[in-house]
Amino acid sequence: MPIIAGPQQPAQWILEADGIFVVTAADAARQDIRPLKVLLIDLMPEAIGLRVQLKRLLANTPLQIDLTVVSLEGGAPVEDGSPRSFSEVAASRFDGLLVSHLDAGERALHQVPCWDELRDVLDWSQDHVHAAMFLGWSAFAALDHFYAIPAVATPRPLVGVQRHRLQRRQSYLLRGSDDGFDVPVSRNHTIDPAALAGSPWLEVLADAPESGPYLVRNRSRRQVFVTNQPHYEPGHLLLDGRNRPGQGDAAAATLPECTWRSHAQLLFANWLNYYVYQTSP
């Protein structure tokens, strides 16, 4: 879904130079398609390139996206025309919500500075958003807040590329996926599979032998929890490895080969199509 180049986005040439598929507001109007209104809450606005990569993934399907980007806790300088805080969009409704990853290190969920504001946003999303996807740390935060599924600290930081496996081959979210696929992992927490198995509202769609549950959805398909970082580029993973001394993976000192782009594209395209576009009122 190309992103509409408008007042809430940088200049069109800037977006295109970053490899983001865009459509002008005039061309979007001529196509006579209702754009999907998507809100991106960027928890790590200072991370160079992550917001651009998320935009690339959102823009890589045929329809149109009216994208709004905000940061919590004041965040970092925002793009021209973008809201400066969540309060500026709180009265609006959105087809889709995407909450980014946050590098919280070894801190417990409730000790992260933006926790209180994020908790308010999660409550707000119940009545103002049709479908939501939570990436990385925000997935653990949302599982804790909505379902009391605790995040369990790992013996050592998990940083690297891990092989994942399907648990539900017929899931729309993974339609077209290989049985095994690579995904970057960068976190200090995991989820106890027994806690998920005991929940009647949640279902594990994919996992990894070492890092555990990766892709979790609720039964209504309105919430998707992605515990790892499929949106990462190799440089982001390398930087995380260098920032976690003692994590024990020598491979984290070298730039990894990117073997997960196709999975990331498929995951975002399927979410936008099956969980947002096809079911949005």
Image (tube, grey):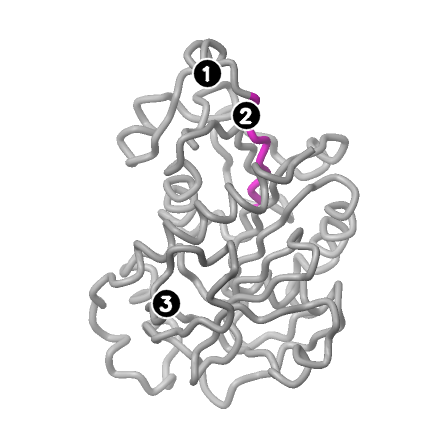
Q: Nearer the viewer, mark 2 or mark 3?
A: 2
- Dot 2: few (<14), some (14–19), or many (≥20) neighbours within 10 Å? some
Q: Tell me: residue 264, above or below residue 82.
A: below
The structure residue drawn at horizontal position 72% and vertical position 30%, both measured from the top left corner, is: 92
Q: Nearer the viewer, mark 1 or mark 3?
A: 1
Q: Residue 38: within the magenta?
A: yes
Q: Which mark is residue 184?
A: 3
Residue 201 left/right relative to 176? right
Q: What residue sits right under mark 1 in the picture?
A: 28
Q: Amino acid at mark 2?
A: Pro
**What range of the chain is rendered magenta?**
34-41
Q: Amino acid at mark 1?
A: Ala
- Marks 2 and 1 close (CB-CB < 8 Å): yes
Could you say whether the residue bearing mark 1 is in a helix, strand or loop? helix
Q: Which mark is residue 139?
A: none
Could you say whether the residue bearing mark 2 is in a helix, strand or loop? loop
Residue 199 left/right relative to 169? right
Pinpoint residue 110: horizontal percent, then vertical percent.
70, 69
How far apart, in angstroms, are the residues tagged by discs 2 and 1?
8 Å
